[in-house]
Image: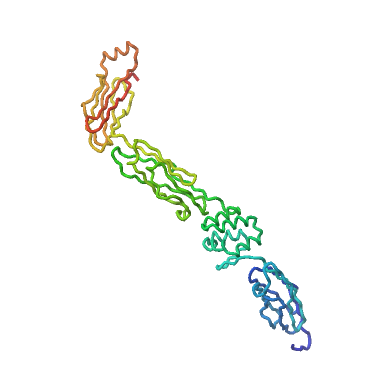
Amino acid sequence: MTNFEGPIPRLNVDTGSINLEATRVVTGEIKLRNKGGSTLEGRVVSRCPGLTFSPAKFEGNRQTISYSFDPKASGIQAGHSMRSMAYITTNGGEKAINISVKVIEVPIQTPDGYLIANIQDFYRYYLKNPNAARRIFRDNDFYRLLIAVKYPYKEVYEALYEDANRDRAIDNFFMLSGLAEKNNISLTPGQIVFTQKPYDTTTMESSIEAQCSNNSYVEAVAQAAPEWVNLPIGKLTAADFASEKLATINFSISPRKIHATYAQGQIQIGSQKVDITYRRLPAVTAKLKYSNLSYDDQGIIAIENNSGKALRIKVFSKESYIRFTAKGYLIEAYGEIPFEVSLSAFTRAQQFFLKQPYMHAEIEVEAESGVAFKKKLPLTVGRW
């Protein structure tokens, strides 16, 4: 050490102790200052395994000394602590630094640098990197973490560990831990109606949208009834859902298996249901646009022809005051047949004296050939 004449250096250190709790390498610094004269110089010596100082030797009146503690290099086991010393020796005096270090128990450090010290950390890591989290879930280190944090359901974890379906196992673990909610499925629409022409037996197709409530694992049985509803899947899992938590479920119905003009079925996925209705259109429908007419009025019969071919429709009324321009009309897919209501003066006077403000009538509509169709349309004629 250099000898000085005149004022000598005097060492000042900003701390007398270093206290560390570490799961991985931790760093810090101490500051030295010369409160005397001349130039301060010296060195720092650590007696604590794993704790190093830089620079170990120095010269100057103001110094910042960095330190680094590596738990692995220290040899201290997880959950244990150590007390030791470091010494600063200078030409301006010496200073002993008390060292206290503790290696915190069983954290998990992932390959991408994420530290998992508890279940909440693990869940946050799962949300960022689910594939890596599933691998950690089955590691021995993870079981040691559960012991360290005193996880209350270790027996359940052991059962989940045996589940070959890792997605289901880890999501059940998070639900058990109160960190995730059950993933519920909703289906839209709630009802689907198929309408088909009378002689058409073509297979009909449609789809259902399934929406998940969250990103947790989901698995639901999918079934359809009766046999004319064709559902190509037997269950719905998380792999079926896109990033928007939506899945499209395609299905079809087989009209050849339906022996009625109306039938109902159902698709059930989990606890959710979609009603399926099938309607076969009648070959011909006929209805009055207005069923209440006055003594001098005009009416219309609307004819819908679903038979797939042109039909000749015959119309007739036994009431002489209901008049058509023809006895029959050729109807393609749709047609309107006009008629007139015209009461004679005698009939009107008769209604007046009988105090009958209205009377009932009927129009008969019939398909002449090709389709069996006959219908009576009631109407009321009166003084409105």
Q: Quadrant of residue 30?
A: bottom right
Q: Residue furthest top?
A: 353
Q: Residue 142 in the image: state x and y as whole percent.
A: 60, 63
Q: Position of residue 336 (x, y in %)?
A: 27, 31
Q: Quadrant of the C terminus?
A: top left
Closest to the observer: 357 or 87? 87
Which quarter of the picture shows residue 6?
bottom right
Q: On the picture, is 368 further left or further right than 204? A: left
Which quadrant of the view contains residue 113?
Answer: bottom right
Q: Residue at x 76, y 88 (%)?
A: 4
Q: Is residue 149 above or below residue 302?
A: below
How many discs mark residues in the rendered view?
A: 0
In this view, the residue in front, 301 or 362, is 362
For residue 316, side relative to residue 239 (left or right):
left
In the displayed structure, 309 sits above or below 208; it is above
Point out the image quarter for the N terminus.
bottom right
In the orientation shown, which residue stands out farthest toward the right?
6
Please state the horizontal and vertical placement of residue 77, each as a whole percent of the image.
68, 70
Residue that appears at 68% across and 81% down: 56
132 left or right of 259 in image: right
Asked if residue 90 lies left or right of residue 362, the reply is: right
Q: Eyeballing the image, is 238 above or below 329?
A: below
Q: Horizontal and vertical percent for residue 289? A: 32, 29
The vertical placement of 20 against 363, above or below, is below
